[in-house]
Image: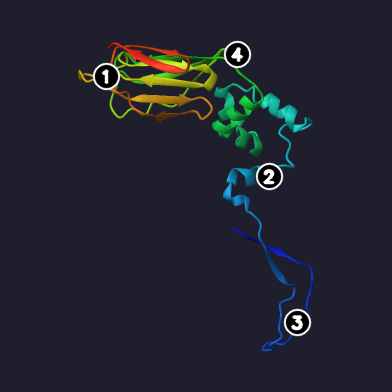
Amino acid sequence: MQRVRFSSQKAPVHKLGDSQMTLSPKFRLAVIQSSLLNPSLEFELSLQGEPLIPGLPDDVALNCLLRLPVENHGACRVVCKRWHLLLGNKERFFTRRKELSFKDPWLFVFAFHKCTGKIQWQVLDLTHFSWHTIPAMPCKDKVCPHGFRCVSIPREGSLFVCGGMVSDVDCPLDMVLKYEIHKNRWTVINKMNTARSFFASEVINGMIYVAGG
């Protein structure tokens, strides 16, 4: 995309129909890479003059905001446009936390409703001692809460859910789901070679091993 840059240089204006007629002022096309290709970048550039926290340098203010508990992000996003930009994009938020070496410990707790079998992952922030939830797993079928196994790789900020069984059907699953903290989303990755349920799993030297079931 290109932008039109105006020049203050003027040229003579001739009568309508004159073969020497030119425009005044002149228009020149400058090849400028538009930040519209990256909307979040343009938005941020447009807010450069607006401080994150009035009275504080932006680096100090950012250091403070990156410590906000996740469950408070929704309320804090309405404070101003820059807070909305920072806290509204979880991938950017956690990437910046990682750049600043913030490593608050989280405890993932798997919960389900006894009657409906509805599954939900809850997270305890061990720094702020506060709870929040993460998006639901992208399962096509209703999965038995007891059948699958999960492992985590803390240094990567990833949680893996493997295998399982379709509820009320004796049919094991070969699915593998990956949750990434920095992106706050689940991804369906390569399936296991063998469908399994009620098995054991562990991480050894960065490799996930499953056995039995």
Amino acid under disc 3: Val
> Residue 158: x, y in percent?
48, 22
Q: Is residue 37 left or right of residue 213?
A: right
Q: Quadrant of residue 93?
A: top right
Question: Along the polypeptide, which appears first: circle 1 or circle 4?
Answer: 4
Residue 112 in view, yes or no = no
Q: Tag 4's secondary structure?
A: loop
Nearer the observer, disc 1 or disc 2? 1
Question: Contact, CB < 8 Å: mark 1 with mark 2?
Answer: no
- Location of the C terminus by quadrant is top left
Q: Which residue is mark 4?
A: 127
Q: Which residue is mark 3?
A: 13
Q: CA distance from mark 4 to mark 3?
A: 71 Å
Question: Is residue 129 depicted above or below 80 in this figure?
Answer: above
> Residue 68: x, y in percent?
62, 23
- Location of the N terminus by quadrant is bottom right
Count residues near mark 4 (Cα–Cα under 10 Å), then give few for <14, some for 14-19, many for 20+: few
Amino acid under disc 4: Thr
Task: Tell me the residue at 79%/71% (across/down).
Answer: 9
Question: Is residue 62 depicted above or below 34 in this figure?
Answer: above
Q: Tag 1's secondary structure?
A: loop
Q: CA distance from mark 1 to mark 4?
A: 35 Å
Q: Which residue is mark 2?
A: 45
